[in-house]
Image: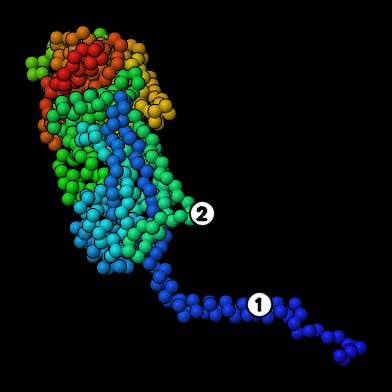
Amino acid sequence: MPRFTGGSHVSWFTPPRIASVASAVIFAVLAGFLFRYQIIKGADFEEESKKNYVIKVPLKAARGEIVDVNRRVLAGSRQSFSICAVPKTTLKNEDEIALLARLLEVDEEYIVEKLSKTGSSYRPAVVLRDVDFATLSAVEEMSADLSDVLVVAEPVRSYPGGEKFCHLLGYVGEVTQEEVAKNATRYASGDLIGRAGVEENYDDVLSGTEGYKMVRVSMDGGEVPIDYTDVPSVSPEPGKRVRLCARSDLQMLADSLLNGRRGCVVILGVRTGEVLALSSNPVFDPTLFATGISSADWKDIIEDRDRPLLNRAIQCTYPPGSTYKLVTAGVGLETHLIRESTRYKPCYGSYRFGRRTFKCWKEEGHGSSDLVRGITVSCDVYFYQLGERMDLEDYYSYSKLWGLPERTHIDIPNEVGGLVPNTEWYDQNYGKGQWTRGIMLNLAIGQGEVLVTPLSLVCFVCGVANGGEYAVPHCVKAIGNDGDEAENEPEFIDLSMSETTLAVLQKGMRGVVEDEEGTAKAARVPGYEVAGKTGTSQNPHGDDHAWFVCYAPYDEPEIAVCVLLENAGHGGAVAAPIAGQILRYYFAERDGGTVAMP
């Protein structure tokens, strides 16, 4: 064996050399696999991947219940099934759209429109809500050809209270594209939110929190659950319950007494501002909106000349007629133009001012009256003479102070304010020097340009009844489920009215109902004294409107009622009897008697 006596020698099979060779071999093998699967077989795998994809399916939260003060359900939720599709993929598949349109019995354009709102999204969008069993079965049977279509269970709004509560409750409707764009973190196309009434104003607490689940959709349209532990799934959280101040019996009574006539009835708690009933007629069916209203039904509603969507208690303004004599009298007393004992020229059925003759509603006249009798018999001539002496700016300022042209800030949306004109208003609308003081005679009896909502008028009367302050009207008594309710704390508005003025107005209103000369004897309640004021307001668009507003009992006010009937005639003959039936029912029921609905 030779011997090496000098230099260095490294064997080819040393450990570093072996490691290097192994790495090269492994890299070559991996490169081969990658080449095979990415280049040679890549197209095949890409096609296979399209057969299955993971999507996030929203789980809709059940909307919170709306119940009456005694927890009777007026608006709830029921389970239903909706047909949904993935916009991103469905819009590229004309065959799928055509098949789905045939199964759902809708136009293809309808499906495209529904999905186009979020066309780039993998989030399933609702195509058709609340499908029947036959349609559901047909879609399931064709699932192999509907790979981008899912059947999703979701709660749908129901209204056990029906039409009788529609203006108080409101309804739900789909979000618009503008609303989605404005608040994309909260809304998605097809979501339902509150529209009008309590549904809209309390949408945040009623809507709950949406959940979701992750699913893999297979080529045959089936939903394959994902078992990955690191993929989140969140259960929906139902909305909170909203309990109203309203009593179902009073609401149904008010609705029945309107008997299909255009108008409204508002019933308030005098000391609390609680809305015990709010009925407006004509009505609409809120269930039409619960699953997305059809174009035909929507057309019928918006083209209805009676405008059933209008809540006449808060969204319509009317000349108040003689009910506003309470305000005129209050202004006269507060500005010291008159006292309770003040008498003007006797009423002989008309009053001459300049070249015009202003008539009293009673042709033969009322003779001589002091202020209280002027209110009791509603003598126009007495108030013409008071208006003649009154400053327009005082009339405007006190009306504004007492909230008549203002919104009451009731807790349902879309309330409008009224109109009490002042000098600036007349100058702008008629021109300086183009109007005369004669306008004050009309304004003094609630005619001319003055306009109020029924709710604002009954709030003013609550203030008179309650010693000079009234609670801001509110429909909701409490929010939360049993054991976790947070009650509404009312806010009070001070009329800043003197005790003398309050006493005179109260005495005059008592006379309207309780005196033999009063204009509202039909509102009497055995065993209780009622105070009120009738009104018959001229309407340039038709017959007179009938008003009556009242409170009871006179000594310890508890309930206030306002009745307004459009084009119905005299307030004492038409509106006062309705209020009387409501009061008689209320006190009979409260006193524990056997009560039958009128």
Q: Is residue 356 left or right of residue 392?
A: left
On screen, residue 172 above or below 456: below
Q: Which mark is residue 230?
A: 2
Q: Quadrant of residue 532?
A: top left
Q: Nearer the viewer, residue 500 or 524?
A: 524
The CA distance from mark 1 to mark 2 is 34 Å
SS at mark 1 in the image: helix
Residue 331 appearing in the image? no
Residue 233, how many percent across, how many down? 45, 50
Q: Name which residue lies at 34% across and 53% down.
A: 189
Q: Residue furthest front?
A: 1
Graded by Cα atoms within 10 Å as few (under 14), some (14 to 19) or many (20 or more), the crowding at tag 1 reads few
Q: Nearer the viewer, residue 341 or 304?
A: 304
- Residue 518 shows up from this direction: yes
> Element at badge 2?
loop
Give the quadrant of the C terminus.
Answer: top left
Q: Residue at point 19% right, 46% down?
A: 302
Kind of residue at badge 1: Ser
- Which numbered mark, 1 or 2, is in the foreground of this view? 1
Looking at the image, tell me whether mark 1 or mark 2 is earlier in sequence order: 1
- The image quadrant that residue 289 belongs to is top left
Height in image: 137 above or below 17? above
Q: Nearer the viewer, residue 460 or 47?
A: 47
Residue at the image point whose x is 29% and y is 26% from the top: 246
- Kindly identify the amino acid type of the residue bearing the numbered disc 2: Asp
Nearer to me, 223 or 189? 223
Marker disc for residue 290? none
* Outermost residue, bottom side: 2
Residue 384 placement (x, y as % from top left): 20, 21
Q: Which residue is mark 1?
A: 23
- Tell me which residue sits at (34%, 18%) in the image: 271
